[in-house]
Image: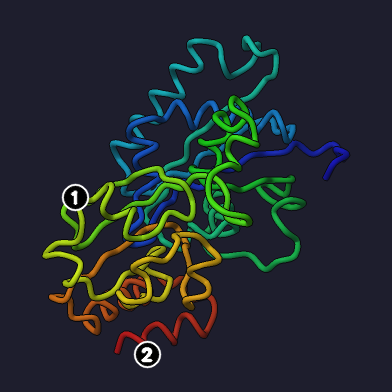
Amino acid sequence: PKQSDGRPSYLVINADESEPGTCKDRDILRNDPHTLVEGALLAGFAMGAIAAYIYVRGEFIREREALQRAIEEAYEAKLIGKNNTSGYDFDIYMHHGAGAYICGEETALLESLEGKKGQPRLKPPFPANVGLYGCPTTVNNVESIAVAPTILRRGAAWFSSFGRPNNVGTKLFCISGHVNNPCTVEEAMSIPFRELIETHCGGIRGGWDNLLAVIPGGASVPLVPAEQIIDTPMDFDALRDLKSGLGTAAVIVMDKSTDVVKAIARLSYFYKHESCGQCTPCREGTGWMWR
């Protein structure tokens, strides 16, 4: 709400990165957590929040330690907290999850933060009006918050100069599977798939003729056959036209040694195992799909 009704506002940052193949947020937490702390302060100030809660995935042990150190250093430097150098009182708290994939869903994450069972809420009401502890809450992910300081520093026009219309900016691509050099890299949106792999991963294992298929956006998006994706721009619109999606930009590359049925069965088992059981289509359907 633009006008406060007396309730405090909160910023919640979703670092419960559990999608198979996705590790972009992990690299930010591990290697550059101060960027996230700075972004949280800026985002919190912009929305008038009194505090930020960073919900970290249960399996992220080293990442949690690195983030906690960064938060403590920011408090010691009086950049956050009460009576800080900016003049805007703002606290940052880190919450360690217990490893449930469902808590990556924003309302299940809020339930978990409140100490309840991590299951999605019915919407409406939406978190923007009734979120954490019944207060207005903005939930966003690590990458979006961490890039905010750079956009403010360099300007929106600079950020929008990357990519193509309706798909602008930069994106963290985490590339895994059958490439010569798996990596996480920040690249311009709409970069062609072939250029992305050649530039940063040293090509496909066994050469381009050995490419079978690609999952372009994490395990929950459909895979795309090699001949369709090879020169496709890596952005939301182009991949939607191929009946897939950019998703989390977790690019999983499969060569011709891959048994696609077995690979999909493994992914199906993950979703069967991680279903919270609240809704019938997911609770029953994931099990049927796996079997």
Marker disc for residue 288: 2
- Quadrant location, the N terminus: top right
- Decide if residue 278 is on the left or right side of residue 44: left
Marker disc for residue 275: none
Q: Mark 1 falls on what kind of element?
A: loop
Which callout, 2 or 1, points at the residue further toward the start of the chain?
1
Residue at 59% x, 35% y is 158
Residue at 35% x, 44% y is 185
Residue nearest the viewer, comparing 112 with 174: 174
Residue at 55% x, 45% y is 169
- Decide if residue 225 is on the left or right side of residue 222: left
Residue nearest the viewer, comparing 159 with 39: 159
Query: On the image, numbered disc 1 is attached to which residue?
Result: 181
The quarter holding residue 290 reads bottom left
The quarter holding residue 177 reads bottom left
Give residue 146's position: percent from left, percent from top.
51, 36
Give residue 92's position: percent from left, percent from top.
55, 29
Give residue 55's position: percent from left, percent from top.
48, 44
Q: Are marks 2 and 1 in contact (CB under 8 Å)?
A: no
Which amino acid type is shown beneath numbered disc 1? Answer: Asn
Badge 1: residue crowd in 10 Å (few <14, some 14–19, many ≥20) = some
- Quadrant location, the C terminus: bottom left
Per the model, the C-alpha gap separating discs 2 and 1 is 36 Å
- Decide if residue 104 is on the left or right side of residue 212: right
Which amino acid type is shown beneath numbered disc 2? Answer: Trp
Give residue 134's position: percent from left, percent from top.
72, 49
| For residue 156, above or below residue 190 | above
Badge 2: residue crowd in 10 Å (few <14, some 14–19, many ≥20) = few
Q: Mark 2 falls on what kind of element?
A: helix
